[in-house]
Amino acid sequence: MLKPLGDRVIVKVQEEEEQTVGGIVLASNAKQKPQTGEVVAVGEGALNDKGDRIKPSIAKGDKVLFDKYAGSEVSYEDQKYLVLHEKDVMAIVE
Amino acid sequence: MLKPLGDRVIVKVQEEEEQTVGGIVLASNAKQKPQTGEVVAVGEGALNDKGDRIKPSIAKGDKVLFDKYAGSEVSYEDQKYLVLHEKDVMAIVE
Amino acid sequence: MLKPLGDRVIVKVQEEEEQTVGGIVLASNAKQKPQTGEVVAVGEGALNDKGDRIKPSIAKGDKVLFDKYAGSEVSYEDQKYLVLHEKDVMAIVE
Amino acid sequence: MLKPLGDRVIVKVQEEEEQTVGGIVLASNAKQKPQTGEVVAVGEGALNDKGDRIKPSIAKGDKVLFDKYAGSEVSYEDQKYLVLHEKDVMAIVE
Amino acid sequence: MLKPLGDRVIVKVQEEEEQTVGGIVLASNAKQKPQTGEVVAVGEGALNDKGDRIKPSIAKGDKVLFDKYAGSEVSYEDQKYLVLHEKDVMAIVE
Amino acid sequence: MLKPLGDRVIVKVQEEEEQTVGGIVLASNAKQKPQTGEVVAVGEGALNDKGDRIKPSIAKGDKVLFDKYAGSEVSYEDQKYLVLHEKDVMAIVE
Amino acid sequence: MLKPLGDRVIVKVQEEEEQTVGGIVLASNAKQKPQTGEVVAVGEGALNDKGDRIKPSIAKGDKVLFDKYAGSEVSYEDQKYLVLHEKDVMAIVE
């Protein structure tokens, strides 16, 4: 199991063939290609100036929309994961 | 439904043929091409240093003027949306 | 009507033929070409760290001097406007 | 009359033929060519984080030494002026 | 023995042949190649604005996932070590 | 007389023939060529966030070691001076 | 004697032939070549926002590991020294 640090989240990437989540088709965009996935682990949050954790706005199980070029890819038991900073997550798909 | 995170807003983009909102015609400008649209969802706001949310100045239903090259495009049920940061919204069209 | 957000101001651009405001002729300068105009709308001001608005130093009706390359141009009823950040306004012409 | 905003000062530029102020001859320097001039107007000062003005260290009438490539040039009644940020003024010539 | 300063950690690098830690195979990624290793020493933590140490989230003995191109390599008794900043550690492998 | 502003100091540059101060010979270094000189004037110090002056660590008469490429050169009565920011002074030669 | 200012330290550079300190052989690394040396002088520390000195984590006599390309070289009585910022020191060799 991977435990992300700070403001990181780990996302199980949606396969490109299945890229319509809840009916959303992502437009191709040369600059930024958003993708969707499911959050499988969330860090404790970044530290603020006083040393307290900033509670993440994202929870395990959320479907999220993120920038394709953000984060670092790892694979685990034939599933691709992405380690993202919370700021790279644009929206939650409800 | 997309729920934007932090200081993001989701805008329903005005078609280019309909680019006069309230009589405003946007001048062509090589550097920055502003566009208009209607806000369909607003995030809870960015976090300040104390961990409180900064209330967004934009509300659902506002007609807004934004920089064409800002944000990330997604499409949903044949309508283009743009995920923008609040700072990329220049003005509200009243 | 356009309502600028945050620290933005909207300026009615002075035509280049009329570029002497109060007798001031702007020197040509390869790096920065200042221009003048009249402020037609002012935002509520930027937010400081405590979430309070910073009162703008510029008011509606002020004649201002700004950098020609700053801001985004829009036109409305055959009049060009410029959406500027307050920091891009160099001086008030009195 | 020009009223500079924030931390800006307006300087009446010393002609290059008269570039010795109080006996100081400015050395040629490929990177930075300092120049002298007389301050004709001073802004109210930049705002600090609490919203108070930071009192400028420069007063009207001061002879100042500044970087030639800093600021924006304007001319008024056949006299060149320079709009500078206070931080671009290196020293007061006494 | 090396005692890292501030927010640095020293990691005993996992050999590339042994790059599956707990069954995780790291995907090749042109931009960022994550690697794993074991933490052998942790600094006292960075200083916050008040001069207090920010307690590191990583402890000696943790298996960590980090960006291959981060940090500086040193070798000690035929073992490669990497001196990393804590922010370059993406996740703890549990 | 030149009165430096803020965190600036004015240094009387040591001639290159006399570049051994107290027996120190400065090594040639392609990236940074330190030089020595004597401080002839010190500014009141930079302003901190509260508007108080930060007392300079350098005093008039100090022999200082600085980066050759830092600062702006001026000459006054056949003597070269350098206007430096305090942060560009590396060490005091005692 | 050189007295470093602020957060600087002065390090007596370890000769390259003697680059194993306590048995540590530094690996060649195209990006960053760490080196070792002995601290001979430490500044009073950087100033924090309140104007207090941040106590350095390094003391005179410490053996330190630093990035070869950091700092400025000076030589004194046939010994090379390096003037480094504390943040460029990676670890203390104990």
Image: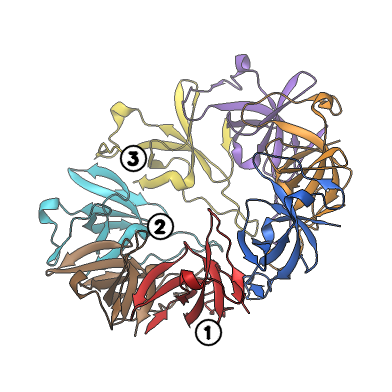
Chain colours: A red, B blue, C orange, D purple, E brown, F yellow, G cyan
Identify which residue, B42 or D85, lies in the foreground: B42
**Does the CB distance between marks 3 and 2 fall below 8 Å?**
no
Above or below, comparing residue B86 to residue F60 in the picture: below
User: On the image, numbered disc 3 is attached to which residue?
Assistant: F32
Secondary element at image label 2: loop
Is residue A46 in sight in this rendering?
A: no
Kind of residue sitting beneath label 3: Gln
In the image, D84: left or right of B22?
left
Kind of residue sitting beneath label 2: Asp
Tell me the number on the disc at residue B38. Answer: none
Q: Nearer the viewer, mark 2 or mark 1?
A: 1
Tell me the number on the disc at residue A61. Answer: 1
User: On the image, numbered disc 2 is attached to which residue?
Assistant: G7
Q: Nearer the viewer, mark 3 or mark 1?
A: 1
Identify the residue at horizontal 85%, vertical 24% (top origin): C23
**Does the CB distance between marks 2 and 1 fall below 8 Å?**
no
- Rendered-image quadrant of the N terminus of chain A: bottom left
The alpha-carbon separation of the residues under discs 3 and 2 comes to 18 Å
